[in-house]
Image (cartoon, rainbow, N blue to C red):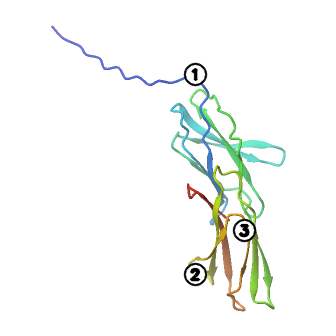
Amino acid sequence: MVLLIFIITKNTLDNLDPVTPELKAVSINPTGGVDVSWQVSPSDETSAYIVYKDQGNGFIAIDTVFGRTTTTYNDATASTTSVETYTIVAMDDCGNNGLLYDQPHHTILLETMVNRCGKSIDLSWDVYENWLNPINVNQVRVSVNGGTPQLVTNETGSTTTFTYTDINDGDLVCFTARAVELITSEASST
């Protein structure tokens, strides 16, 4: 007599559309393009994410990222000199889409104005929007003559300006502004 034992595993799937997770951040990538990141969807049936970009007349799907735990995308064709806005949708293996994430995120831009007589540079940047928590701090880093970027200030979440005064004639200076979310420490950089 042979006794056969079958072990049945059960995956409970529902017939609901996958839940679209929240966006984590949108940042200008220092080597080009824009990086978009998000949380993992809580829906086990999620198999991909569709990345949408605002083209001025609404959001258009620009790419699909496969894998439930793949949570980043680089838009290599994005502008680094104008605001770019993104959102996402979760998708299952059957091609069913969740709802479009309703809190799109956009890049922040840093503008500079050189005051040659005052030997200073005035910086201003956009407010990062649509995190679930407020901005904890806005950081400014500077690289002088190709050196390692150094933190020069931590400004309150509502402050979007800073004057940098430690310059010498002929210095090549590169600035980065970085917004950091309260509680999660997610960050978006220019």
The location of residue 115, given as percent across then percent down, is 80, 85
**Mark 3 packing: few (<14 Cα in 10 Å), some, or many (20+)?**
some
Quarter that holds the N terminus: top left
State which tag comes first along the sequence, 1 or 3.
Answer: 1
Disc 3 or disc 2, which is closer to the eye? Answer: 3
The location of residue 158, given as percent across then percent down, is 72, 64
Vertical order, 139 against 15 (above or below) = below
Confirm or deny contact between disc 1 and disc 3 (CB under 8 A): no
Q: Would you name the residue on which mark 1 appears?
A: 15
Tell me which amino acid carries mark 1: Asn
The location of residue 17, given as percent across then percent down, is 61, 28
Q: Which mark identifies residue 168?
A: none
Q: CA distance from mark 3 to mark 2?
A: 26 Å
Is residue 116 rendered to the left or right of residue 100? right
At 75% from the left and 63% from the top, the residue drawn is 126
Disc 1 or disc 3, which is closer to the eye? Answer: 3
Residue at the left extreme of this rendering: 1
Q: Would you name the residue on which mark 2 appears?
A: 147
State which tag comes first along the sequence, 3 or 2.
Answer: 2
Residue 65: quarter of image: top right
Vertical order, 99 against 84 (above or below) = above
State which tag comes first along the sequence, 2 or 1.
Answer: 1
Q: Would you name the residue on which mark 3 appears?
A: 159
Tell me which amino acid carries mark 3: Thr
Quarter that holds the C terminus: bottom right
Q: Is residue 35 visible?
A: no
User: Mark 1 falls on what kind of element?
Assistant: loop
Tell me which amino acid carries mark 2: Gly
Q: Is residue 164 visible?
A: yes
